[in-house]
Structures are given as C-alpha cells and as structure tokens.
Image (cartoon, rainbow, N blue to C red):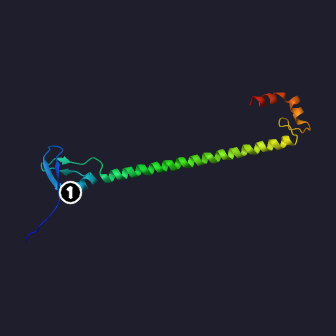
Amino acid sequence: MSLTLTETIEPIHCAECSILFAVPSRFNKARREDHNRFYCPSGHINIYRGESEAEKMRRERDVAIQRVAQRDDEIKKQRLMREIAERQAATARGQVTKIKKRVGAGMCPHCRRTFSQLATHVEMMHPQEMKCEAAE
C-alpha cells in the first residue's frame, strides 16, 4: 500500500543558529497567529513576536471604533453646549422684553416707580446710571 501526500512547506531560518529548515504552511501560519514557541532541528526556541495580520486588523478596527466613539461624545457635548446657549439667549431675550414693557408702561428700571415723564425722571434722579449705560 502506498500513500501520496502533498503539502506546502515554507523555509525558516532559526533565530539562534540560522539553520535553514522547513515547516508546513499551516503550522507556520498558526505560529504567527498564536505566538507559540517552536523549535529548530538543533533544539533552539523560535517564536514570532510581531503582530499577525489578524491582530493588526483587530487593532486598527478597535482604534477606528474608539475614534468614532470619541467623535460621538464630542458631538453630544457640542449639542448640549448649543442647547444651553440657546436657553440662555432665550432667557436674556425674555428679560429684555420684560424691561422694555415696563419702560414702555412708564416704570423706572432703576427704582421701579411709575412716571408719566420717564425720560425726564431718569435724567434728573439717576444720572449715574445714564453715564454707565452710555459707556456700554
């Protein structure tokens, strides 16, 4: 009985003694991926320490996922800041509207008393506030 076996082998140089030997391709591929030790014919330990293609791809994928997550966090932060600024602007507009209505009704914004001649009252009774408002 005879058996014919066909297998692809790959040449390797021992890291210690530089002897050339060959191993099956699937064995070589498995050692590159799992980083387990293997021995040369002289008994020296060899190991593939570098990243395998699968490890490189996983690392690159993880880095890309992390970048996407960071950008998502930044987008959420910017949206929150925009919403806060919009609420603050709306509050400020409301305060301005409130003051305009009071002044329109003749109420002094400084002492909260009502006058029919409001402009005259402010010029006479609150000249320091007029100087501050002019400076702004």
Q: Residue at x 91, y 36 (%)?
A: 117
Q: Residue at x 81, y 30 (%)?
A: 130
Query: Considering the image in quadrants, where does the N terminus appear?
Result: bottom left
Can you give x and y, in whole percent of width and height, for residue 136 in the image? 74, 31
Q: Is residue 1 above or below residue 117?
A: below
Residue position for label 1: 25
| Identity, as a three-letter code, of the amino acid under mark 1 | Ser
Neighbour tally class for label 1: few under 14, some 14-19, many 20 plus, Cα within 10 Å = some
Q: Which residue of the protein is positioned furthest toward the right in this rendering?
A: 116
SS for tag 1?
helix
Q: Residue at x 72, y 45 (%)?
A: 91
**Total tally of numbered discs in the picture:** 1
Can you give x and y, in whole percent of width and height, for residue 124 in the image? 88, 29
Can you give x and y, in whole percent of width and height, for residue 7 in the image? 16, 61
Q: Locate residue 116: give its quadrant.
A: top right
Q: Residue at x 32, y 54 (%)?
A: 54
Q: Nearer the viewer, residue 124 or 24?
A: 124
Residue 129 horizontal side relative to residue 49, left or right: right
